[in-house]
Image (tube, grey):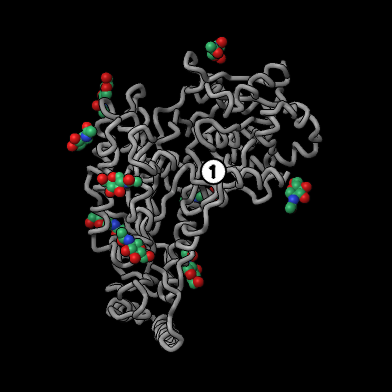
Amino acid sequence: MGKSTVGGKSRNKELLYVFMTWLVFCTLMLSGHYSSLIELTMSSTSFPISGKSTFSLPTKSLFPIRNTKENLPDGKKDGVLDSCSGRYIYIHDLPSRFNVDIIKNCNSSLIKWFDMCKCVMNGGFGPPATNSRDILQEHGWYATDQFSLEVIFHNRMKKYQCLTNESSLASAIYVPFYAGHDVSRYLWESNISVRDAAGVDFADWISKQPEWKTMWGKDHFFVAGRIIWDFRRETNKSSDWGNNLMLLSEVKNMTVLTIESIPWSPTDIAIPYPTYFHPTSQEEVEAWQKKITQQKRPYLYSFVGAPRPNTQRSIRGRIIEQCLDSREKCKLLNCNISSNDCYDPGRVMEMFLNSRFCLQPTGDSYTRRSTFDSILGGCIPVFFNPGGAYGQYVSYLPKNHSDYSVFIPESDIREGKTSIEEVLRKKSEQEVVKMQKEVIKLIPKVIYVDPSSGLNTSEDAFDIAIKKVLERVNTTRREIVNGRTLTIDKLRKKPQQSRQQYDEDYRLLE
Ligand SMILES: *[C@@H]1O[C@H](CO)[C@@H](O)[C@H](O)[C@H]1NC(C)=O
Ligand SMILES: *[C@@H]1O[C@H](CO)[C@@H](O)[C@H](O)[C@H]1NC(C)=O
Ligand SMILES: *[C@@H]1O[C@H](CO)[C@@H](O)[C@H](O)[C@H]1NC(C)=O
Ligand SMILES: *[C@@H]1O[C@H](CO)[C@@H](O)[C@H](O)[C@H]1NC(C)=O
Ligand SMILES: *[C@@H]1O[C@H](CO)[C@@H](O)[C@H](O)[C@H]1NC(C)=O
Ligand SMILES: *[C@@H]1O[C@H](CO)[C@@H](O)[C@H](O)[C@H]1NC(C)=O
Ligand SMILES: *[C@@H]1O[C@H](CO)[C@@H](O)[C@H](O)[C@H]1NC(C)=O
Ligand SMILES: *[C@@H]1O[C@H](CO)[C@@H](O)[C@H](O)[C@H]1NC(C)=O
Ligand SMILES: *[C@@H]1O[C@H](CO)[C@@H](O)[C@H](O)[C@H]1NC(C)=O
C-alpha cells in the first residue's frame, strides 16, 4: 500500500476538501456546537482520498477529535475545553481466550519450572517483596517478574484518564492480547502449529472486527511482554525459536510495545522492563530518589548475572573474571542455577545501591531487565553493545548516552584489550556525581506506578509509551488523509542494516 502517486489534480481537490473541512470544523469549535460537529465527521463516509490509493473510503472519521457529552470524563462540562482531546483510547473487547484464560491456567500450562501464578498476582506486580536487606521502603516494592508487563499494562490501561467506549471516537485502540504469556506456554513445544495457533487465531479475529477497517489496524496497539525474538520465527523448522506472531500481515499493521525490539529496525517501540518498584505516590518516588542520592557506594562496580555456556559469543565469562580480579573494587552476585539470591529484590537492589557502576552485558538477547533495576538503584550502567539500550529505549533515555552511562565495546573485552576497572577509575569524582544525578533523574520515567491509588505521580513509563503510540497513529492518520506513503511502511521497507554493520557503526562512535 502507501502509493504516493496521487495525481496533481485530485491532490489539489483533496487539499481543498481538507481545508474546507477544517474551516467548518473551526467555525463549529468556536461556536461550541459539539453535537453538529460529531454528525459532520461521522457522516463523511466519502473522504476524497485519491482513487488510486489502496485505501478505500473509511466509513468512520479518521479524525476523532471531539467526544460526545456522554463520553466526557467526569467533571467535564459541555463547553469546557476537553483536555483528553486527541488522547482518547478505546480498549478492544477481546474474547477471554486471548488474555485472562491464558493466565488462568498458570499452575499447569505456563512455563513449567516457574510459578506463573505468583508472577501475575497483584495486577502483574507479583508478591510483595520481602525486605530481606532492610533497604526497601515499606510500600510499593514487589518481586516483579521481568515478563509480566502485559498484565501490568492492561490494569494500568483500565485506569487511563481518557478512555472512551466509542471506538470511532478513539485516537488509538488498545488490544489486550497477552502475547508473551501465550507464547511462553509453548516455547519448548516442537509442533510449530501448536506454537502459532493462538497468534493466528488472534490475527484472524481482530481483522474481522468493525474497528479494523477504519485504518487497517494502524491505530491498534498491544504489548508483548517478552523480547521480540520470541515472536519472530522466520522458517517453519521446528528447531527454530518462537512463534510467527510478528510476521503475520495483520500484526505488522499494528504497533507493538515490547521490552526488546530489533535495534536496527525501529518499527516496534521498546519500553522499559518492569522493575520491583511500583509506588503509589510522588512522595514515595522522591523519598527513594533522596535515599539513593545520599547512599554510600563502597564498590567501584558490580555485576549481577550468570555466565553463559557459549564463551565464544558471550563476554559474561570474561566480565566475571575481571570482576574477581578487581577484588574489593568489584562485587559479584552470581545468578547460577544453584543460587536463589537473584530472585530476591532486596538482595539485588542492595548490589546496585552499593556500587557506582553496574555492568550490563548482553545475555540471551541484547537487553536486560537489570538495566532498569540498576537505574532504580542510582547505579551508572555500563553497556558493551549498543543494542543493550541506546538502540532501544529512545524515548526514555537521554540522546547523549555519555550523560548517564559508559560504553565499552564488546570486542575489546573479548580480545582482552580493555580493563573495565581502569576505564571506570579514570572517571573523575565530578563526572561520576554528574552521571549519577542524571541516572537518578531517570527513575520516575522508567517505573510503572501503581494505578490503584489515584495516579498522582509524574509521567512514568506507561505515560511515555502511550504518548509515543498516539504520536505514531496521529502521523499515520495524517499521511493516510493526505495520500502520502506512510512513514511506518517506509521504515519497514528500509533495507535492513545487518547486525554486524549496526554494531560496527556504534564501535566507531567511541
Ligand atoms: C496453584 O497451585 C497452588 C499449589 O499447588 C495453589 O495454592 C494455588 O491456589 C493454585 N493457583 C491457581 C490459580 O490455581
Ligand atoms: C464504558 O462502559 C462500561 C459498561 O457499560 C462502563 O462501566 C464504563 O464506565 C464505560 N467507560 C467509559 C469511559 O465511558
Ligand atoms: C501438530 O499439531 C496439530 C494441531 O494439534 C496437529 O493437527 C498436527 O498433526 C501436529 N503435527 C505434528 C507433526 O505432530
Ligand atoms: C509455513 O507454513 C505456513 C502454513 O502451512 C505457510 O503458510 C507459510 O508459507 C510457511 N512459511 C514458510 C516460511 O515456509
Ligand atoms: C495493512 O495495511 C495496508 C494499508 O497500509 C492494507 O492495504 C492491508 O490490507 C492491511 N493488512 C491487513 C491484513 O489488513
Ligand atoms: C553459584 O553461585 C553461588 C553464590 O553466588 C556460588 O557460591 C557458587 O560457587 C556458584 N556456583 C558455580 C558452579 O559457579
Ligand atoms: C555528550 O556528553 C558528554 C559528557 O556528558 C560530553 O562530553 C559530550 O560532548 C556530549 N556529546 C555531544 C554530541 O553532545
Ligand atoms: C498530588 O500530588 C501533589 C504533589 O505531590 C500534591 O500537592 C497534591 O495534593 C496531590 N493531589 C491529590 C489529589 O492527591
Ligand atoms: C496530532 O497532530 C496534530 C496536527 O499535527 C497536532 O495538533 C496534535 O497535537 C497531535 N496530537 C498528538 C496526540 O500527538
What residue is shown at x 70% (from left), y 32% (from top)?
Answer: 412
Q: Is residue 339 above or below residue 510?
A: above
- Callout 1: 10 Å neighbours few (<14), some, many (20+)? many
The amino acid type found where label 1 is placed reads Val
Q: Is residue 259 above or below residue 127?
A: below
Q: Is residue 349 left or right of residue 480?
A: right
Q: Is residue 45 left or right of residue 12?
A: left
Q: Is residue 302 left or right of residue 164?
A: right
What residue is shown at x 31% (from left), y 70% (from top)?
Answer: 69
Relative image position of residue 137 (x, y in whole percent): 53, 29
Relative image position of residue 365 (x, y in whole percent): 51, 35
Q: Quadrant of the N terminus?
A: bottom left
User: Which of the 4 image quarters holds residue 189?
Assistant: top left
Quadrant location of ligand 3? top left
What residue is shown at x 39% (from left), y 59% (from top)?
Answer: 162
Residue 452 shows in the view = no
Relative image position of residue 364 (x, y in whole percent): 50, 31
- Which of 197/180 is in front? 197
Q: Is residue 250 above or below residue 354?
A: below
- Which of 4/348 is in front? 4
Q: Quadrant of the C terminus?
A: top right
User: Which of the 4 image quarters holds residue 314?
Assistant: top right
Count of labels in the image: 1
Q: Is residue 349 above or below residue 334?
A: below
Relative image position of residue 499 (x, y in whole percent): 56, 44
What residue is shown at x 33% (from left), y 27% (from top)?
Answer: 111
Residue where numbered disc 1 is placed? 446
Q: Secondary structure at mark 1?
A: helix
Q: Is residue 411 left or right of residue 92?
A: right
